[in-house]
Amino acid sequence: MEVESVDPGTDPLRSIPKSPVVVLMIGMAGSGKSTFMHRMVVRLQSKQKKVYTVNLDPAVRNLAYPVNIDIRDTVNYKEVMKHFGLGPNGGIMTALNLFATKFDQVLSILGRRAESLDYVLIDTPGQIEVFNWSASGQIVCDALAVSYPTLVCYVVDTARCVKPVTFMSNMLYACSILYKTKLPFIIAFNKIDVIPHDFLKEWMEDFEKLGDALSRETSYVASLARSMSLAMEEFYSNLRSVGVSAVTGAGCEDFEKAMVEACKEFEESYVPFLLEQRRDLEAKRRAAVEEQVKSFERGLDRAKRGHQELESEDVLQLEEDVRNFSIGEHEMD
Ligand SMILES: Nc1nc2c(ncn2[C@@H]2O[C@H](COP(=O)(O)OP(=O)(O)OP(=O)(O)O)[C@@H](O)[C@H]2O)c(=O)[nH]1
């Protein structure tokens, strides 16, 4: 398996255009990422914006929105699980890592489309750690951020944050994503049709209020969360949050305003950093891709040794599929 050379059309050192704006949707399973993507696609299209969508979740069954690039068209994660002897999370992670080794193909497709696009919305797996802490997440984020204004939207299920301890753990996740990606960040407190998010804003703006709520809980985790709540104030000051409902569309206007602000932040804070770091980032990304290719080869060797009882054509077919897949697109409307 060879690492592909970069298409000149996607030269990572060219200047970063103002559009399309890339939004990475990250959030726990069931938080509403796909539904929110659908809502934003419909909303933006109704304003004559050109929206392009990418699905990076190999295990999702149904998508609410029309998808242009779909990881499920490339590697079959169930086959990957079977042949590499992995569980569901390992299968998703390996499929995503494999996809990331060919992410230059996505950049080429976007490069050809970019001039006519306003937004690229990217859906990620609900197993946040699979994206955030794997090589693939790093490869995808770095590749996009050196090419287009790139933002993170962290989708949170507001109803699942009613307990202050759960809210705090959700915020710690958000914190780890912000510090890992370093990209402009918007928290979308989703499902405000079920429960308004005002109490969460209060907890973010006044750590004493969160402390009060936590003092009603007696667990060890609550006292840990209490001692962390002050430290989190600094983190909250680095992000913007809005309440939305993917189902009713409430709050979407605020979300659009937050995207405009986040783009400004990208331009003012991130682009200067990129201008200094781009060569290093690109070298790091290519090294990460090469490492993934090697790790894939090692995995295949192990799989072959472990599957001596299986039909060798089976293993060869999988090897062929995962080595030589190419990334295509579904036409836009
Ligand atoms: N009431 C309400 N339900 C919502 C909202 N957004 C999503 N849902 C529901 O929440 C459930 C999960 O939504 P999805 O969009 O599939 O969530 P996801 O984050 O993409 O989930 P994974 O694909 O598992 O990562 C579905 O039943 C949605 O209909 C919302 O704003 N309000």
Image: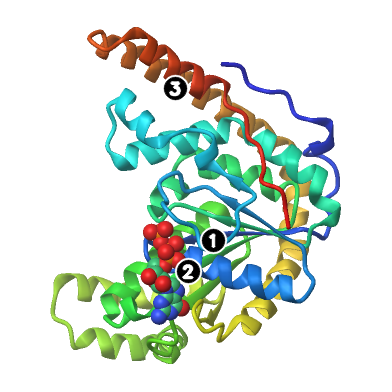
- Using the rendered image of the protein, determine whether residue 333 is visible from the camera's viewpoint: yes
Q: Residue 51 in the image: x percent, y percent?
A: 71, 61
N-terminal label among 2 and 3 = 2
Query: Tag 1: residue type?
Result: Met
- Residues at badges 2 and 1 in contact (C-beta under 8 Å)? yes
Where does label 1 land, which residue?
25
Q: Residue 216 in the image: x percent, y percent?
A: 18, 88
Measured in 3D between alpha carbons, the distance from the residue under mark 2 to the one under mark 3, in whole angstroms, is 31 Å
- Residues at badges 1 and 3 in contact (C-beta under 8 Å)? no
* Residue at the image position 20 percent from the left and 70 percent from the top: 221
Q: Is mark 1 within 8 Å of ligand 1?
A: yes
Q: Is residue 193 left or right of residue 324?
A: left
The disc at residue 295 is 3
Query: Tag 2: residue type?
Result: Val
**Mark 3 secondary-structure assignment:** helix
33 or 316: which is nearer to us? 316
